[in-house]
Amino acid sequence: EAQVTQNPRYLITVTGKKLTVTCSQNMNHEYMSWYRQDPGLGLRQIYYSMNVEVTDKGDVPEGYKVSRKEKRNFPLILESPSPNQTSLYFCASSRWDRGTTDTQYFGPGTRLTVL
Amino acid sequence: TQLLEQSPQFLSIQEGENLTVYCNSSSVFSSLQWYRQEPGEGPVLLVTVVTGGEVKKLKRLTFQFGDARKDSSLHITAAQPGDTGLYLCADLGGFKTIFGAGTRLFVKA
């Protein structure tokens, strides 16, 4: 089954404790992206990756890091989480065809609470 | 920075009613997409529109793209409880995607 998986689905942590949210897709997609969703603000793009070892900042990259060492995986790293990073996080992937993104497939989301 | 404004923010209707939700952009869309997101899940793509004036139909859903490519509407005919969810519009501007805040629709049986 074609899918995007994220782990963990729920996480409660404390300020300053480094954490990683994993994202994996089995569709051989070139493009992957991370979003955060907050009430009244919709989804905002954090980072995206056009292919292995190619990443770039979205609209809200501060406080986050990513890496793309393998095509299927795109982990989101919070080196020193703060309460304002409490949010619902989504990973997405899509084909990258002729310079435009195709349908984005979203993971189920990770609800993060930073105390 | 491009802003996508969706209206209304919240809509509660009875089963069988018709409704329209709107998406307006501060700049011309590159490629407009509509998504539906159900509670506890990620957004799912409904449609992509690219050409100004384009109209697409998906069963009871009709998507309209403005001639100037700065606005769009989603019309649902005879809404059903299964239509309940958050409807999001988005602009695919090459590498980046900009989302609106969404319209939360609740259809009562």
Image (spheres, coloured by chain):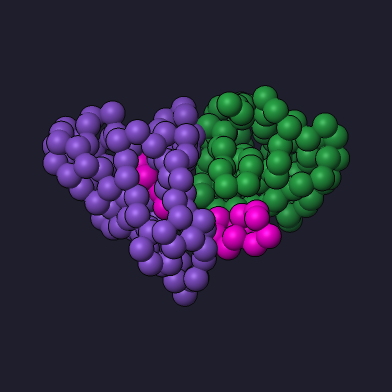
Chain colours: A purple, B green
The magenta span reads A88-106
Q: Nearer the viewer, residue A44 or A54?
A: A54
Residue B104's place in the image compared with A32, above or below, is: above
Q: Nearer the viewer, residue B44 or B4?
A: B4
Quarter containing the N terminus of chain B: top right
- Residue A99 position, x and y percent, is 65, 55
Residue A74's place in the image compared with B83, above or below, is: below
Image side of residue B40 versus residue A84, left or right: right
Give the mark count: 0
Q: Residue at x 73, y 54 (%)?
A: B58
Q: Nearer the viewer, residue B85 or A28?
A: A28
Q: Residue at x 63, y 46 (%)?
A: B94
- Residue A109 position, x and y percent, is 37, 50
Q: Residue at x 47, y 34 (%)?
A: A59
Q: Residue at x 46, y 27 (%)?
A: A40
- Residue A5 position, x and y percent, is 37, 62
Quarter containing the C terminus of chain B: top right
In the rendered image, the residue lying farthest to the front is A53
Residue B63's place in the image compared with B27, above or below, is: below
Quarter of the rendering containing residue B63: top right
Q: Any magenta on residue A102? A: yes
Residue A23's place in the image compared with B87, above or below, is: below
Image side of residue A100 versus residue B42, left or right: right
- Residue A6 position, x and y percent, is 34, 58
Q: Is residue A44 visible?
A: yes
Q: Is residue A10 visible?
A: no
Q: Any magenta on residue A85? A: no
